[in-house]
């Protein structure tokens, strides 16, 4: 007969297995379309055991959100909002499932997605104000808005990963292909920098600045 330590180990193992199955199901189908029965079946446990560990489906979703924040966002936030190719590789390193979960969470608007986006904006704003303080003055609306838009652009590659995968011919959330998006971003940033410095780019920038104003 197993002692209490064996039972505790089995309990923790079942909890992690249930959570991982929930992550995959929520990522693919969304929270609303996923039933506890489906999760229990895929995890090889009873619905009662799922409820024992997590209570309700909302409780399980909260546990998945917390796990994503702990393992993915807090570890990789400093890399996720940066434009260089290595950034996305660091975000997805060993976390392809979590990135897919985050993609769905960004669409569904879960608390984890909100925390991720706020963190990405904060890190991006620090990057912009620290690198170009004359252009993006700390605390300015210009820095705030640029950080929000840049973060949304990068988050968009996660949300639209299935479309990117079809167009680029590789699974862009797989670890071995994670640099594909980053490399393309770097190429686009370099080309746009050249364009902005051109006569046409300067003319467009001046027109936009006149219309929008500057703080």
Image (spheres, helix red, strand yellow):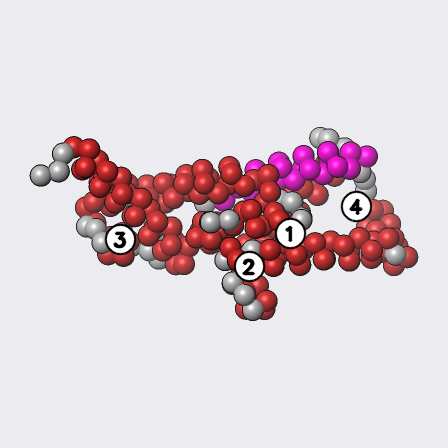
| Local SS, label 3 | helix
Which element carries disc 4, helix, strand or loop? helix
Gap in angstroms between the C-alphas marked 1 and 3: 36 Å
Reading the chain from its start, which is encountered first: label 2 or label 4? 2
Can you tell which quarter of the image residue 16 is in?
A: top left
Residue wearing tag 4: 212
Q: Residue at x 29, y 48 (%)?
A: 18
For marks 2 and 4, give the one nearer the viewer. 2
Q: Label 1 to label 2, Cα distance in Å?
A: 11 Å
| Secondary element type, mark 1 | loop
* Residue 194 higher or lower than 91, as above or below: below
Quadrant in which the N terminus is drawn:
top left
Q: Of all residues shown, which one is farthest toward the top?
A: 139
Task: Tell me the crowding category of disc 3: few under 14, some 14 to 19, or many 20 or more residues within 10 angstroms, Cα based.
Answer: many
- Across and down, in percent, residue 164 comes to 57, 63
Quick check: 93 left or right of 30?
right
Q: Residues within 10 Å of mark 1 (few under 14, many from 20)?
A: some
Q: CA distance from mark 3 to mark 2?
A: 28 Å
Which of pointers 1 and 2 lies earlier in the amino acid sequence? 1
Question: Which numbered disc flags the more N-terminal residue, 4 or 3?
Answer: 3
Q: Which residues are magenta?
A: 111-134
Residue designated by label 1? 85
Write the residue at 36% across / 40% down: 63
Examine the image and state in which quarter residue 11 appears.
Answer: top left
Provide the residue designation for mark 3.
43
Residue at image coords 54%, 47%: 91
Name the spot of residue 124 as percent of width and height, x first.
65, 40
Q: Which residue is mark 2?
A: 177
Badge 4, how many Cα within 10 Å: few under 14, some, many 20+? few
Q: CA distance from mark 1 to mark 4?
A: 31 Å
Name the N-terminal-most of marks 1 and 4. Answer: 1
């Amino acid at each position: 007969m197993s002692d209490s330590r064996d039972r505790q180990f089995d309990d923790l193992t079942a909890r992690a297995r249930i959570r991982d199955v929930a992550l995959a199901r929520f990522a693919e189908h969304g929270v609303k379309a996923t039933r506890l029965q489906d999760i229990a079946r895929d995890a090889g446990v009873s619905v009662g055991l799922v409820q024992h560990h997590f209570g309700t489906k909302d409780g399980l979703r909260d546990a998945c959100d917390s796990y994503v924040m702990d393992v993915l966002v807090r570890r990789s936030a400093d890399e996720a909002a940066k434009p260089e190719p290595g950034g996305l590789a660091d975000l997805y390193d060993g976390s392809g499932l979590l990135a897919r979960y985050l993609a769905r969470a960004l669409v569904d608007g879960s608390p984890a997605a909100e925390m991720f986006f706020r963190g990405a904006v904060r890190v991006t704003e620090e990057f912009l104000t620290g690198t170009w303080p004359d252009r993006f003055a700390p605390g300015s609306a210009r820095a705030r808005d640029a950080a929000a838009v840049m973060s949304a652009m990068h988050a968009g590659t996660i949300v639209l990963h299935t479309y990117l995968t079809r167009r680029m011919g590789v699974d862009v959330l797989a670890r071995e292909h994670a640099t594909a998006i980053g490399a393309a971003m770097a190429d686009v940033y370099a080309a746009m920098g050249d364009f902005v410095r051109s006569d046409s780019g300067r003319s467009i920038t001046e027109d936009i600045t006149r219309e929008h104003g500057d703080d």
